[in-house]
Amino acid sequence: MLVVMKQGADDRQIDQVCRIIREMGLAPHPIPGKMRTAIGITGNTGPVDPSALAGLPGVLEVIRVTKPFKLTSREMKPEDTIIRVGEAAIGGPEIIVIAGPCSVEALEPTVAAARELRRRGAHLLRGGAFKPRTSPYAFQGLGREGLKFLAEARAASGLPIVSEIMSTDDMSLVEEYVDVVQIGARNMQNAPLLKRAGKIGKPVLLKRGMSATLEEFLLAAEYVMSEGNRQVILCERGIRTFSDHSRFTLDLAIVPELKRLSHLPVIVDPSHAAGRRDLVIPLARAAIASGADGVMVEVHPDPSRALSDAAQALTFEMFDELMDELRLMAPAVRRPIAAVGGSAAKAAR
Amino acid sequence: MLVVMKQGADDRQIDQVCRIIREMGLAPHPIPGKMRTAIGITGNTGPVDPSALAGLPGVLEVIRVTKPFKLTSREMKPEDTIIRVGEAAIGGPEIIVIAGPCSVEALEPTVAAARELRRRGAHLLRGGAFKPRTSPYAFQGLGREGLKFLAEARAASGLPIVSEIMSTDDMSLVEEYVDVVQIGARNMQNAPLLKRAGKIGKPVLLKRGMSATLEEFLLAAEYVMSEGNRQVILCERGIRTFSDHSRFTLDLAIVPELKRLSHLPVIVDPSHAAGRRDLVIPLARAAIASGADGVMVEVHPDPSRALSDAAQALTFEMFDELMDELRLMAPAVRRPIAAVGGSAAKAAR
Amino acid sequence: MLVVMKQGADDRQIDQVCRIIREMGLAPHPIPGKMRTAIGITGNTGPVDPSALAGLPGVLEVIRVTKPFKLTSREMKPEDTIIRVGEAAIGGPEIIVIAGPCSVEALEPTVAAARELRRRGAHLLRGGAFKPRTSPYAFQGLGREGLKFLAEARAASGLPIVSEIMSTDDMSLVEEYVDVVQIGARNMQNAPLLKRAGKIGKPVLLKRGMSATLEEFLLAAEYVMSEGNRQVILCERGIRTFSDHSRFTLDLAIVPELKRLSHLPVIVDPSHAAGRRDLVIPLARAAIASGADGVMVEVHPDPSRALSDAAQALTFEMFDELMDELRLMAPAVRRPIAAVGGSAAKAAR
Amino acid sequence: MLVVMKQGADDRQIDQVCRIIREMGLAPHPIPGKMRTAIGITGNTGPVDPSALAGLPGVLEVIRVTKPFKLTSREMKPEDTIIRVGEAAIGGPEIIVIAGPCSVEALEPTVAAARELRRRGAHLLRGGAFKPRTSPYAFQGLGREGLKFLAEARAASGLPIVSEIMSTDDMSLVEEYVDVVQIGARNMQNAPLLKRAGKIGKPVLLKRGMSATLEEFLLAAEYVMSEGNRQVILCERGIRTFSDHSRFTLDLAIVPELKRLSHLPVIVDPSHAAGRRDLVIPLARAAIASGADGVMVEVHPDPSRALSDAAQALTFEMFDELMDELRLMAPAVRRPIAAVGGSAAKAAR
C-alpha cells in the first residue's frame, strides 16, 4: 500500500497520516520527492481497510501494491495444477475439448449427441440442466431430470459430464450426477455458491464474470479454494464491452496472464463470446494459440430447433471441422490433443 | 423480430427462411428493398428461439423488435408504483434518503448511528449483515447477529431497515428482521435468489449489475415480479467502464429511461459509484436532478475505522451537508423531501 | 514512480533495478516489506521512460505516482479560470447555456434560430460548419459558407459563436469567424490540431474523447495550454460503454473531479450523450447539479428536417422548458443563470 | 430502416409516420403485429436522416437495417484485395510480419535494426518519426529527420517502410519517404487526414480507434477509399475496456468478421494491445490463428533505453522466438510465412 500526498501537503498532514497508519498496526515509510511525498505502508493490511486513508487531509491517492490472492497464486504453488476427470487431464500437456448442447432437452438426443461427440473426439460432455436465463419467461432447463439424462449419456458414451449449478440448494444433486461442477459467469461473485463449491470433492469449472477483472476472477477461485477444494478450472468466456460484432469480447490476453500468475488450468469458451457459430472456430483456434489448456464449445444436432442459444451452436459437421483445426493447431503450440476416444474416432471416419 | 437478408440472397433462400418461420408457428412478412430484403416476423416468439434463423444461408442479421419485459413495463401498468415502508412512500412525490454504515459492526454504534441519522433526516436505515466481498479474506459481515443489531436500531430510532440478502438459505432470517430486502449488484442475475425474493411479502431493493443493460435490469426485476412480489425498487449504482476517476461510472441516463419504460421506483446509490466520499454529494445532487425517487448513501460515525468501503462513507457532518443540498435540490425538481423525522430534526438543529 | 518486485525477487535483482534507476538519472528508495520489496523512484522522470523497468527480472509491476499534467492543474493555479466571451463569463459563478443547430444548413434559419435562442435565454450560439461524420457519405457541413452564416447570425443576434474545427488548414478561417473554437471528441488526441489551437487568441472548447480517461483529457488540454493559449473550456459529452439506452454514457463524476484537479471551466453536452431529445433535459439538470459551469445543447427549428443528429435536437419549445428547468436548478447549486439576453427575454415571454 | 411503434400507438400516429416517410421521398411498409406495429422503410436514405422519426409521437424505436459501407464491402468486391509492397503481398496467402522500433531515435541504430530484422525474417520495417503522445511533454518524434533515417534503413536493408502520419501538412513529406502510410488509432476518425490519404498513390495502414465499432472502422476505411485510394490495410490494435491486465483488450473476433464483411487485408498489432512484452508472442500467435494476414510488432535493440513504449518492445532474441512461433503457427492456418529475406535469414542462423 502506498499513500501519495498532494503537492502542497504540509508536515502536519504527513505526520497525521503516519500516526493513523501506526494506529492501524502498520508501519509508515515516508519517501520525500521533488514534487510531493509518498508514504509506503508495510505490515498485514488484512483486518483494517487502509483505503480509509484516502479521505484524510493532504492525501491525493492510495495505491495498493500487494496482490490479494494467495492459494490461486503461482507464487504460492509454482507447478501447474492438473485436474484429472475420466481419461482427461486438464491443465497438463494435452489440449482438452468439452462439447455438448447448451441445454439438455430430452433423453434420446442427449445420449445420441454424447456418443457422436465421443466418436468425433470430444473429451468431456457439457449440457445445461439448470439454465441461467436473462428472462424469467425463457426455457429454464429440465433440472434434476436433465441431470439424469446427462448421467445416462455418460453411461452410454464414457464421457465425463460438466453441468452448471445455480443454487446451493441443488449442489448435492449436481454433485451426485456430474463430474465437473460449473459455476457460470452470472454467479462468479455469488459467494455462498463459491463457498459451497469449495466443500465438494469434484472439480469446479469457474467462468469469468462478464465484467470481472483478472484479480476478481482469481479471488472468486480463491473463495472456492479457501474452503478446501483445490480443483478449480478457470474459463474465459468474453467480457462486456462496447464492441458489437460479437456477443461478448473474448479477452485472450487473460490466458497467458492467468497462466503466469496462477497454477490453475485455463480454458476458453468461444461459443458464448461469439454468440454466432461462424466465429466459434477462429476464436477456438486463437484460444489454443494464446496458450489455453482447452476449449468448451456448444454443439447441437439441429441448431435451428435448439431451445436456447441456437445461433452459436455448432452442427456435428462443424464440430468435426473444429477438431480438424485444433489437430492442426496442436503442433503449433507444441501440445498434443488428448486422444480420449479421439484417435480411434478419427481412424473410424 | 426482423430477419435481414444479405444483398445477394436469392428467392430460394428467402423462401427457406419464410418456411422455417412458419414451422416455428410464426408469420413471415417479406419487405423487398432496393438493396436487400428484410422479413418481419409476427406471432408469439416465446417458446422457440428465433435467433436460430441467424445461421441460415442468405441471412445477414436477426434484429429483435419487441421488448421482453412485461410486468415491470409501463405499457402494462401506466401509473407509478409507490412502495410504502414505515412512514416513507418510495416512488411517490417525495424524495427519500436511505443511509447507514456499509457493514453493521457492533450494537452500540449501529443504534447510535440510526438515532443520529433519523434526527438528521434519513428515512430508512441501511446496513450490511451479509457482505458480498471480492476477497474471501475480507470481513464478511456479522450475519444473524448483525440483523439483530439492525432490529434494535430500528426499535430505538423508528427507521425501517434495508439489508442485503446473498443466499436463499438466509431469506427467511432476513425477511424476519428487515423491512426492505436488498439484492446486490453481484446477484442481479442470481435467478434462484430473485425467484425466492419474489415470494416474500416485503419490498425488494434490486441493484443494477455492474455490467447489466437496462433490459437485463428490468428482466431481473421481472424475475421477482413474476413470482408474485410486485414491490420492487430499482437502484442504479454505477457500471463498469474504462473510466478510472470514480470506482464505477454512474449512468444517470438510466433514471429517466427506467421511469419512462417502467412504473417502478428508481433510486440511486452514489456511494458505491463514487468509491470516494468527496464525489458522493455532487453525484447525489445529480441523481435527484435526473429524476430519481431517492438516494442511498453510506454513512459511518468514524470512517477511518470502518471495516469495509471506508473511503466512500460520509461522516455525520457530511450527511448534514448532503441533506441540506438535497433540500435545496428538491424545489428544482418540484418535489419535497419526505419529512419522516426530517423536519423535526431540522428544527432541532 | 514505484517499482513493485515479485515475492521471490532476490537481492541481485533488486540491486539491478536500483542501478538502472540511477543510470536514468533518478534516485531509487527501496522499501522492504513482509511479502515483497517495493522501490520508490524520485527525480525528473521526463526524458526517459521508466516503464522500461517493467520488463526487468524480478519486477512485478511499475506504478506511476506523479500526475503528468501541469498547466491545467489546480496545484499549479489554485483560482478558477474564467473565460469571457461576449457578455458571458464561463467558469465564473453564473451558469452558461450554449445552444444551436448541429449543422448550419442555410442562412435564414441560422439567423432566425440565433435570434430565437437569444430571446429565449441562450448565451452562446453553437453551429457546425465543418462536421465530423462517421460516414463519408453523410452531410459534411457547408464549410466557409457555414462560417459566414454563423457570423451573420452573430451580427443579427449578438450571440457569440462556437464552431468546430477539424483541420489545421481551416484554423485561420475558423479563427476569423468564430468566438470560441471547438475541438470535437474525435480529435481530442489530434496533437497537431491541439498545438495549432494553442497558438490562437480565442478560447478553445475541448470535448472529451469518447474513450478518454480524465488524465488523457487534461493532457489534451495541456497540449493547447503548453503552446500559450490558456483559455480552454473542458466539455464532458459521454463515453463509450456497453450501456445501450443512451448513445453514450454521460460520466458526470468527471465534473467535480475535473473541478478539483483543474482550474479550467467544465461544461457538459447532454445532447450527444443522450442521442435522443427526451433525455436531454434530465441530463442537463443533472449536469448542473453535479457542478458543471454550463451546458451545450442542440436545438433545431424543425428537427424532423435536420441534416444531422435530428433525433437529439430540441425544438424551441423544449429549449424554453430546458431554460425554465435550469432557472429552477440554479438556486439549488447556489448559482445564478447568466442573464445575457435571458432576463429581458424572460420578461418578454 | 425500420420504425417500431409503441404498443398503444393509434392509427393517426402510424399514418403521420407513414406520411413523413413519404415526404422524405421514401416508401413506408407497415407490418401490423399482435403487440405493436412496425413500419419498414425502403428507398435511398442517404440525403435525409430518418432518425428524425425517432422523436415522433407513438414511435418506440428506429432501427437501421442496411449497412452503410460500400467500397470496403465484400458484397461490392467479393475477391480479396492484395496489397504489394516491395516483395511482400499483404492480404494474399502468405503471413506478413512488420517490425521495428516504436520511435526512430537515431540513424545508426535504425539502420542496424533494419538489417537485423530483415536477417531475422521481417517483411516490412515500422518506425515512428511523428509520434502521437498522450502528453505534450513526452518525446514527439524526430519528424523529417526520422523519415530520412528510415529511408536510409530501407536502402541498407531492402525492407519497405511503414510510418505514421499525424497531419495533412506532413503528407507529401511522408509520402515521399515511406512505402506504407500509417494512420494511428487516435486519428481513425480524423476525416481530413483520411481524405488526404485517399489521394496518395501508396497503401494506407489504418489502425482501429480504441473505441471504434467494426462499422466505424470500415467507414473510416471508406473515407480513404471514396477519395480514390483502394489500398487500405486494416489493423486491430486493442480496444479500451475495463479489463486492466493488458493495456488494451485485443478484440480478435473482429478479424474473421472483417474478413467476412470486407475484402481488405487485416493485420493485428499485439504490442500496443499488450503494453507488456511478455504478452506479445501469445497474442501474435492468437492473431494469426484467428485469421489475420499478418502482425505488426515493436522491436528495440535495447528496450531499457527506448524513448517511448519501452515496456512492450521485444528484444531481437524475442523477435527470433516470435518468428519461430509464427513459422510453427503457419501450417495450422494452412498459410506459409512470406519468405522475403526470411528463408535466407533462417538458413543463415
Image (cartoon, coloured by chain):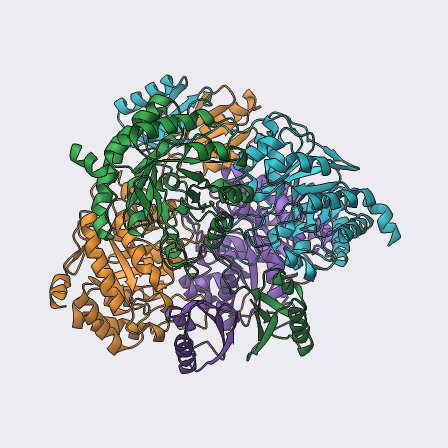
Chain colours: A orange, B purple, C cyan, D green
Name the image quarter holding residue C260.
Answer: top right
- Please tell me whether residue C14 is drawn above or below residue A340 in the rendered image: above
The residue closer to the viewer here, D39 or B121, is: D39
Q: Can residue C129 be seen in this view?
A: yes
Left-right relation of C270 to A226: right
Residue B278 screen position, x and y as percent? 59, 39
Left-right relation of C161 to A138: right
- Please tell me whether residue B5 is drawn above or below residue D286 in the rendered image: below
Rendered residue at 77%/58% (across/down): C317
Q: Can residue C158 be seen in this view?
A: no
Residue D106 screen position, x and y as percent? 38, 22
Left-right relation of A102 to B146: left
In the picture, which quadrant includes the C terminus of chain B?
top right
Residue B313 screen position, x and y as percent? 55, 43
Left-right relation of C16 to C77: left
The residue closer to the viewer here, D202 or B276, is: D202
Residue A211 screen position, x and y as percent? 43, 52
